Every structure is written in C-alpha cells, then in structure tokens.
Amino acid sequence: MKKSVMILCVTAIALMMLPVRLQAQQEGKITFGNLSLIPGIEMQGIYDDNIYKGNGREHTSAKTTIEEKKEADWITHAKPSFALNYMMPERGNINLGYQGDFAFYDKNMNNNWNNNQGLLNANYLAPGGLILGINDMYAVGGDPLGNADQYAIGRATKKWTNDLKTKLGYNLTSNFRTILYYNNSRQKYSDIADYSQDYTENEYGAGLETRFLPKTWGFIRYHYGQRKYDTLGLTQTTDAYNSDYKWSRVSVGLTWDPGAKLSGELNVGYQMLKYTNEYADAANTLRREDENTWTAATSINFQATASTDLSMNLTRSVRNSGSDNNEQFTDTGIGFNFKQKLLTKLSLIGGVTYSRNEYNLPVDAPRVDDNFSANGGLNYAIQDWLGVGVSYNYSRKNSNAELNEYINNQFMALLKIVY
C-alpha cells in the first residue's frame, strides 16, 4: 500500500509542475478550427474492503471459492484518455475517443487488470432533412465488474464487447420525423470456461416522433431483435438446447433537442420475449418460459440552475444467466444523482441507486436479490485542466440465496488532468 500511496504523491507533484503554457489553453482544449484534441490522464487510488464481493461464508458441500472470499486491498488506477471532436455548426459532430483503465493491486497483484475502450460517435442533419447517427463502443479487457447479466461480479474475466447503434431518419416537417434503427451487440470471453456468455445480438426498429413543445419531442417506436449464443458444444448445451431468443418491443416516451434544460430520454414500453429452444437439456427436464413484461430505458438529466445538475435513471429488462441453463431474471432499477457547485472551484456530487433481480429459479422458492448503492464526494478544480477529488461508495446485495449477499465499502482519491 505504501508503494501505491507514493505513486499517487509523485504523480500529484508531477502534474503540478507541468508547463504553465497548458493553463493558457481555452477551456483546457487544443483546437484547430472546428477540430478539438483532448488528451487526459486520471490517477485514482481506491481502498476496497471487499475486492471479490464475497461474504466470507462457505458452501456446506464444497470449499470456499473466490466468490465467497472477503478480502481488502488498495488499488491504484491509471486512466489515460484521448478524444478527437469535430464540430459541424448547425449540422452535427464527429467524435473519436479512447479510454483506458489500468488497475494495480497492492497485495493481490495477480488480480491486476486493464480495460481499453474505443468510441465512435457521429450525428449529422442534412439541409434537406436527412438524419444520420452512429454510436459504436468497442471494449477489451479483464475487469471484475461482471456484465449486465450479473455474471462473474468480483472475478476478473477477460473478454471483448462491441455495441453498435445506428439511425437513419428524415424530417418530414419541422415538427414531424421518422427514424429507422439498427443495433448490433457482441460479447466474447477469452476463457473457454466462460463460453455460456458469448453471444451476438441484432435489433431492427422504426419510430415516429412529433414535436409538441419548442425543444420537446414525443415518440413511439417498435423494435424486433434476436440473441444467438455462440455455443461450442462442450456440454449438453448445443445449438439445439441453448438459450437463443427473439423479442418484440413497443416503447413510447419523450426526448429533447440539444440546448434544452432537460436532456436524455424518457422511455418505457412492453416487450414479448420468446425462446427458440423450449428445453435446456436432451431429457426435457429444464424448461424455459417465455417472458412478456414492461420495460424501461430512461435516463434524464436536468439543469435545475447554473450550479445544480440532477439526473434520474429507470431501467427494466429480462436477462439470461447464460446459454447452458434455463435461468432468467427481470432486472428493475432506479437511480438519482446530483452535482452541486458550492464555490467557484468546489463541487459536491452524490447519488443513490436501487435494483431488484427477480429470478425464475429455484421453482419452489425463486431467488430474489435487492441491490443498493450510495456515493458522495467532493471535486476541486485547481486549474481548468487539473482537478482533485475524494469520494466514498457503499454497495450492498441482499438475497434470499445467502451466499450471494455482500457488503462493499470503497474510499477513493483522484487526480485528473484533461486539456
């Protein structure tokens, strides 16, 4: 731990001794006309009292695995970043970016991991009314953060993912537009033991949007998609028994133009999910059940005042535990966050989230997880390009399956430079 603290201290001194000319750059950016170059680096130190998200309890029929261990450690993160932003006034923008995260453990050095993300985001509005949009995120690494399906939380796993979202639309009038969507998502793990999480998703959609306030649009959308698991046939789960499924979803909501006090999207809907294979085994004992339920993909930001930013998230979806079983769960979550500027250079941040995972198994007493988290912190801008901060994060999982429960406390300090 002493080495990690020393690294942070040396980094702090080095950042403060950077050439004064960096302070003169407007808003901390390097610009060439409409093109901005934005390099950055963040050094973060975290004391984590439960790095494996375990509870210290042992299975009654097996030895304690890594998931049950409760162990503390100091983790040093180095997070380099770089972005290219090209603005097309009144037409849109093109953004290219890279974000890295290199984690170094003080005691458990075998847990060291890194993540690397590449981003492409482009939006264009043609003079004739044509709307084009693309957002692609590619990530490769080996973190212990798990995935959206709650797989391998607390255990570092190497994988790559790619999430592509595209849209093609047309402004029929100043108050009415139509949009077509195509989304593609892929996930691939490096370890063959994690093959049940490998999949490809394709989704197609169409929507109608109408303006009923100066910067507010209402919409209705329909999406059809399918997930195909990349089965290797290493167990009883072959293509004839895997968890491939299709879905249809209708959603309605609100969205806002750039510059409005509200941004993001309010999105709720109803989804019908149907599995390709009814059973997960050749003996037809593990039956899958199709699921029809309401959904949500809402993320709203509100600039209440010049010094106060608020945000709210509401999500709900159906998730699979993997391709080699018949377990599924509904994942419903809500969260609130705020940022309050206290002084010219000092800001207070905080938030709370809650999510509920309701499983279909075991049949006689289905598993239910309640997930809580809360965070708070202070950020101080030493210069436009240099900032420091401290924060605390608390997370907890309560479950009627006791071995899945845990409590986690994290204390964090950071140094950040973006110019």
Image: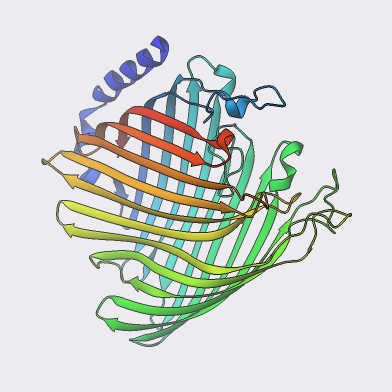
Q: Is residue 70 above or below residue 1?
A: below
Task: Classify 6 as above or below 58.
Answer: above
Residue at the image point whose x is 58% and y is 40% from the top: 401
> In front here: 326 or 204?
326
Q: Nearer the viewer, residue 352 or 144?
A: 352
| Residue at the extreme top of the image, as rendered | 2
Instruction: Write the residue at 85% across / 43% down.
Output: 234
382 left or right, relative to 147: left
> On the picture, is 118 further left or further right than 9?
right
Judging depth in this view, the residue of 227 and 53 nearest the camera is 53
Q: State the image quarter where residue 257 is shown.
A: bottom left
**Residue placed farthest to the front in the image?**
364
Identify the residue shown where x is 47% and y is 44%. 98
**How far across and how far down the image is residue 106, in percent?**
48, 16
Give coordinates of residue 237: x percent, y percent. Answer: 82, 50
* Vertical comparison of 323 with 245: above or below: above
Percent x, y of residue 128: 41, 84
Q: Is residue 303 above or below residue 127?
A: above
Picture quarter with the C terminus:
top left
In this rendering, does residue 267 appear at all? yes
Residue nearest the observer in this picture, 179 or 327: 327
Q: Residue furthest left?
A: 343
Q: Position of residue 148 (x, y in %)?
A: 55, 49
Relative to 207, 216 lies left or right = left
